[in-house]
Amino acid sequence: MQKEDIQEEKEVGLLFLANFVHQVVNPLNGVIGTLDNINDGTYKGAIVKQKVNACRGQLEQCVTLIRNLAYLSDFFFDVSDKEDLKVVRENATSSLPQVIIEAAQFFQIAAEKKGIKIELLDPIDQYKIRARHELLKQVFINIFDNWVKYGLKNQTIAVRTMVNNKDDLVIDIVGQSIGFNNTDAERLFEMGFRSKEAHNTVAQGSGIGLYICKQITTKILEGRISAVHTTKTGLTTFRISIPQKKWLL
Amino acid sequence: MAPINLPSSLHSDTILVVDDEPEHIEWLIDYIEARGLKTIVVNNVSQAIAAASSSQFRGYIVDLNIPMGDWVPTFAIPNDTYEKYRGLLVIKYVRTQGNKGRNVIAYSAHINDLINAEIKVLYSEYIAKGRAKEFKIGVEEMLTKSLGAKSALKSTKKN
């Protein structure tokens, strides 16, 4: 590796760490402040329960971020040649509706604050995915997290499942967002990349969530993930395609 | 456009809070409002400068890591630190308007020498995130001391 490349990689790593610290410190700061308000009596009576619930939401946001870091190392489990690990992962299946509903519930409080609802349009068909539950859930958690941050207020995010003519299971997540330039669509899934529009809305983000989504979708599910924004309608669509060998009904 | 616009109205009972993720500082807003003051929350440099250009506030609490919005600089940006910590642009703006340094508080996730140096130049206050008690002590003067005739800008005294 060239000296300049090493330097650039180091700088990207440092920037990522600085962003990551910021992303974790902010919700923790919210929790500390809320607890202090309960402690000094600023919050009293019925509102205390509501504020404790909000704290839970903020801590869960921290957990999401930290879990993303853990998932980077967790790939060891899913790509390892160790025979005992292969057996576990090859037999793993997860229920797609359950995964999507659990991931949506994870953001219920934060989404409600923005008037956002996440709705699985077909909760009846019990598609099974040949991947570990937690791994698949992280994909949807990261996509929904983006929507809570960059989605427009007061809307329903629709999660639609269908099978295309190649027998791929296609999952579309569709809703209104601040948008992005479609020339950046591929780069959204690169480690550390944040669109200009994202920068203009929230100064810092880890730039790790969609990267993880791509890693899991391509390496574990052997599928594809893409994003497209239509300026005219304001609609953004994230599409995940899973090949037939990786799902069953 | 003039580099700095002077406000024409005075909100002596209101604190301008600038943060792009206000859901994480709800506790601070609740704390200030429980002490009998009002708050206005804006999310980027552009909105903050627009608010400060039309009104003088009792105090300004500014997150240093905020997006620019659509603000086009109307004064020379002093150095790279302002590019990285854009909240400093808001602080420079309100300090140049003539707002007292003790009524302008900067905060961020972490402090470093670059921030320290600029905060000193701007003669404003700084508090690190994650220290609620320090934050409350830091804003205490702003909450308990009225703005006073000497702190009101000339442009707002006319009204």
Image: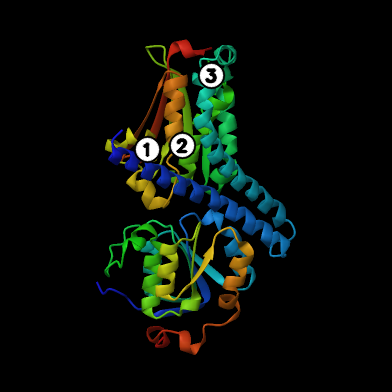
State which quarter of the image contains the N terminus of chain B: bottom left
* Residue to which mark 3 is pinned: A131
Q: Chain of mark 3?
A: A
Specify which label sits upstream in the sequence, 1 or 2: 2
User: Could you tell me which residue is drawn at 46 percent across and 74 percent down?
Assistant: B124
Q: Is there any visible trace of residue B7 in the rendered image?
A: no
The answer to whether residue A36 is above or below residue A231 is below
User: Could you tell me which residue is drawn at 45 percent across and 84 percent down?
Assistant: B152
The residue type indicated by label 1 comes to Leu
Q: Left or right of B120: which side holds A111?
A: right
Picture coordinates of residue A243 (x, y %)? 42, 14
Picture coordinates of residue B81 (x, y %)? 36, 62
The residue type indicated by label 2 comes to Gly
SS category of the residue bearing label 2:
helix
Picture coordinates of residue B98 (x, y %)? 39, 81
Specify which label sits upstream in the sequence, 3 or 2: 3
Specify which label sits upstream in the sequence, 3 or 1: 3
Number of residues whose C-alpha sits closer than 10 Å to that of mark 3, classed few (under 14), some (14–19) or many (20 or more): many
Could you say which disc has been placed on residue A209 in the image? 2
Disc 3 versus disc 1: distance between alpha carbons? Answer: 29 Å
SS category of the residue bearing label 3:
loop
Count of numbered marks: 3
A174 vs B119, nearest the viewer:
B119
Disc 1 versus disc 2: distance between alpha carbons? Answer: 20 Å
The residue type indicated by label 3 comes to Ala
User: Could you tell me which residue is drawn at 41 percent across and 68 percent down?
Assistant: B117
Which image quadrant for residue B74?
Answer: bottom left
The answer to whether residue B67 is above or below residue A61 is below
- On the same chain, marks 3 and 2? The answer is yes
The answer to whether residue B40 is above or below residue A49 is below
* Residue to which mark 1 is pinned: A235
